[in-house]
Image: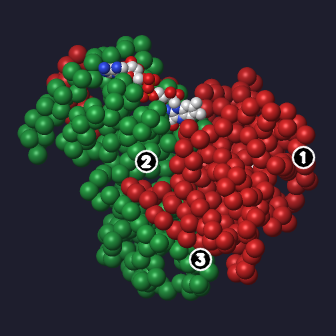
């Protein structure tokens, strides 16, 4: 028996969410008195996974798996879980993991609960808390199947160091041509931009910014902070910014360490999507804007005055704290 | 468990059969409360709507119908209270509705109900949403695909079908990806599969016609719930905001108090 965790990597480097997933798997394994086996697919140097609690790493090297493919990856992880007689399988909350997880759950005939940030409150029966209603509530859910799939929320549990052996072992799952029947033709990814999914800081603009021509100062702030840029729904609906930047209940969820909202009123649908962020700052010229009731820090003021000043100050701060 | 093998036989898909999965969810402005010792969602005073992600998918289905000919069925797993939501989908333009008469408690069992209809009905394209805004499971479409042996594309932001092959664009973290797959195909859709401005508000004629369109109620198949809510909780109330006058103060607080920069 063991806890199996899928560790996501890109170009041979493990993502931070992989470290977090292993940390979480270690937490569960300790509760259940068992071991952690990480599954790495073309992960490169697997030795670092031991640092977060992986006792063993099943290392899959396969050129066919160079590009992410949900079905093939789900098949590989399911085979690893069966080989290890896993009762619990952990995945992350990235777009790829969320794509793969339901397929994996069916392969393992397992109940699946996504959006988890805390360790299960009990493992027998297996009860785990996860966010529902787009962060407006939590459900403590019992998973009743023999094998369970748990999906983590982004930036929820955190990375925890916990030295373990991390012994690597080669693993070659048997894949069939059916696993590749969804064919990835091309991938189009901006490599020079911080993505909302990975960003620790997100700078977001709303309709209060009046027009797309005023986004220079938002991008400047994101540059200074190494942050991703985002926007409210009407801003993307009007084409001021691309859809991929729309955050909120019907857009992307944001679970950053710092979320800076500029000229955004704080409608319920917007707040729901960003409320998993840890520190929220609002800059708005209307002291009655609902966002002020849902943020940690705020400045009541005109964005066109406050933001350039803030950018200057942040530059100064970065220069001193570099 | 043995999941079905892919069906690789050639299909005549010049006239697609499309099934759109409709989740019946509280309106996005709803206040979320619970009853029965916090074990049940309190529907008191709550307006229910078509799950926004499903509405985008339904609109794409209408586009296929108009552009290349298709029949569009909509389906929900739920009690009689979801019928107005299905009628709304009919008013938007779907041809027929199906309701599987059982309470939808967990994603896996809902997927098993839907997979059964997909197999029986021989659908070519099954459109669901990336996630429902109530339980945020993000699992039903993927599970249907795996249970029926269909292909699956999630977070779909563009979809074209030619013959028996679909070309889809999928949103990934930080970009997008173009994929090709044979029908039958299940997609998890979201905004982008059509634009916000393409969404249709049912007009009077649509609403009148919807009353006459078939809405079939089907019995559920046996499928145990694999997960069950033991208890709901609300998030802890938010502490008071700290308002500051100057950017110097703000930067200082973010560095020394919040420790986020
Ligand atoms: C089904 C549904 C789903 C939705 N989903 C989402 C979602 O996922 N995400 C989302 O964001 N919205 C969503 N919405 C829309 C939401 O209800 C709001 O309409 C939207 O969030 C408002 O965007 P905004 O704050 O940018 O614009 P507004 O509400 O127009 O607010 C602009 C703000 O800017 C301030 N302002 C103006 N000038 C200045 C200035 N010079 N300096 C500083 N501040 C200034 C104003 O005081 C105001 O508070 C959804 C709506 C529906 C019906
Ligand atoms: N009870 C249901 N009836 C019909 N379709 C559903 C139901 N629940 C979920 N779906 C579909 O599955 C998608 C994802 O739902 P979920 O996995 O619950 O997040 C929804 O957007 C719907 O398309």
State the image quarter where residue A168 is shown. Answer: bottom left
Does the image show residue A293? Answer: no
Q: In the rendered image, what is the letter of the chain coloured red?
A: B
Q: Which of A312 and A57 is in front in this view?
A: A312
Query: Is A260 in front, or is A147?
Result: A260
Q: Which chain carries label 2?
A: A
Q: How crowded is mark 1: few (under 14 residues within 10 Å), some or many (20 or more)?
A: some
Question: How far from the left and from the top, in percent, is residue A226?
Answer: 24, 46
Disc 3 and disc 1: Cα gap in Å? Answer: 35 Å
In the picture, measured across the screen, residue A103 lies left or right of residue B126, that is left
Residue under pointer 3: A181
Residue assigned mark 1: B214
Tag 2's secondary structure?
helix
**Viewport quadrant of the C terminus of chain B:** top left
Relative vertical location of residue A39 with respect to residue A201 in this rendering, above or below: below
Name above or below for residue B154 compared with residue A257: below
Of the image marks 3 and 2, the number of the one nearer the N terminus: 3
């Amino acid at each position: 028996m063991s806890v199996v965790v899928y560790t996501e990597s890109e170009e041979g480097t493990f993502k931070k969410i992989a470290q977090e997933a292993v940390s979480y798997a270690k937490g569960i394994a300790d509760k259940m008195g068992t071991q952690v086996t990480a599954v790495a697919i073309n992960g490169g140097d697997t030795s670092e996974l031991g640092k977060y609690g992986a006792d063993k790493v099943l290392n899959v090297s396969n050129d066919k798996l160079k590009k992410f493919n949900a079905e093939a990856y789900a098949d590989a992880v399911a085979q690893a879980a069966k080989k290890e007689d896993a009762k619990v399988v952990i995945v992350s909350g990235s777009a790829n993991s969320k794509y793969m997880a339901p397929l994996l759950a069916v392969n393992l005939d397992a109940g699946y609960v996504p959006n988890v940030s805390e360790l299960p409150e009990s493992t027998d029966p297996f009860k785990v808390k996860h966010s529902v209603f787009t962060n407006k509530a939590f459900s403590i859910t019992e998973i009743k199947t023999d094998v369970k799939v748990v999906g983590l929320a982004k930036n929820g549990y955190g990375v925890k160091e916990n030295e373990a052996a991390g012994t690597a072992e080669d693993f070659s799952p048997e894949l069939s041509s059916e696993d590749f029947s969804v064919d990835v033709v091309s991938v189009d990814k901006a490599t020079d931009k911080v993505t909302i999914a990975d960003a620790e800081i997100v700078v977001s603009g709303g309709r209060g910014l009046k027009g797309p021509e005023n986004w220079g100062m938002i991008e400047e702030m994101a540059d200074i902070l190494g942050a991703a840029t985002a926007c409210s729904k009407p801003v993307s609906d009007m084409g001021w910014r691309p859809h991929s930047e729309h955050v909120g209940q019907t857009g992307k969820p944001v679970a950053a360490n710092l979320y800076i909202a500029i000229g955004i009123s704080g409608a319920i649908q917007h707040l729901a999507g960003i409320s998993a962020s840890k520190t929220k700052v609002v800059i708005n010229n209307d002291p009655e804007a609902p966002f002020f009731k849902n943020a940690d820090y705020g400045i009541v003021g005109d964005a066109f005055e406050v933001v350039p000043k803030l950018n200057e100050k942040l530059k100064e701060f970065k220069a001193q704290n570099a | 468990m043995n999941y079905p093998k892919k069906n690789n036989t050639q299909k005549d898909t010049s006239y697609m059969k499309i099934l759109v999965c409709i989740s019946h969810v509280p309106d996005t402005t709803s206040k979320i409360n619970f009853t029965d010792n916090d074990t049940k969602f309190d529907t008191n005073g709550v307006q229910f709507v078509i799950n926004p992600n499903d509405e985008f998918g339904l609109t794409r289905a209408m586009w296929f119908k108009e552009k290349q000919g298709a029949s569009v069925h909509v389906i929900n797993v739920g009690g009689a209270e979801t019928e107005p939501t299905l009628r709304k989908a009919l008013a938007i333009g779907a041809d027929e509705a199906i309701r599987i008469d059982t309470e939808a408690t967990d994603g896996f069992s809902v997927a098993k109900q839907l997979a059964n209809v997909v197999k029986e009905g021989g659908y070519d394209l099954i459109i669901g949403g990336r996630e429902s805004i109530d339980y945020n499971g993000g699992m039903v479409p993927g599970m249907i695909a795996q249970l029926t042996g269909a292909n699956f594309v999630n977070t779909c932001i563009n979809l074209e079908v030619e013959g028996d092959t679909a070309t889809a664009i999928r949103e990934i973290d930080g970009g997008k990806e173009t994929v090709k797959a044979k029908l039958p195909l299940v997609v998890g859709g979201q905004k982008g599969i059509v634009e916000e401005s393409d969404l249709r508000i049912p007009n009077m004629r649509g609403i009148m016609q919807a009353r006459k369109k078939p809405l079939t109620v089907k019995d559920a198949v046996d499928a145990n719930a694999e997960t069950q809510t033991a208890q709901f909780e609300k998030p802890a109330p938010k502490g008071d905001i700290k308002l500051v006058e100057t950017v110097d103060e703000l930067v200082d607080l973010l560095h020394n108090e919040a420790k986020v920069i």
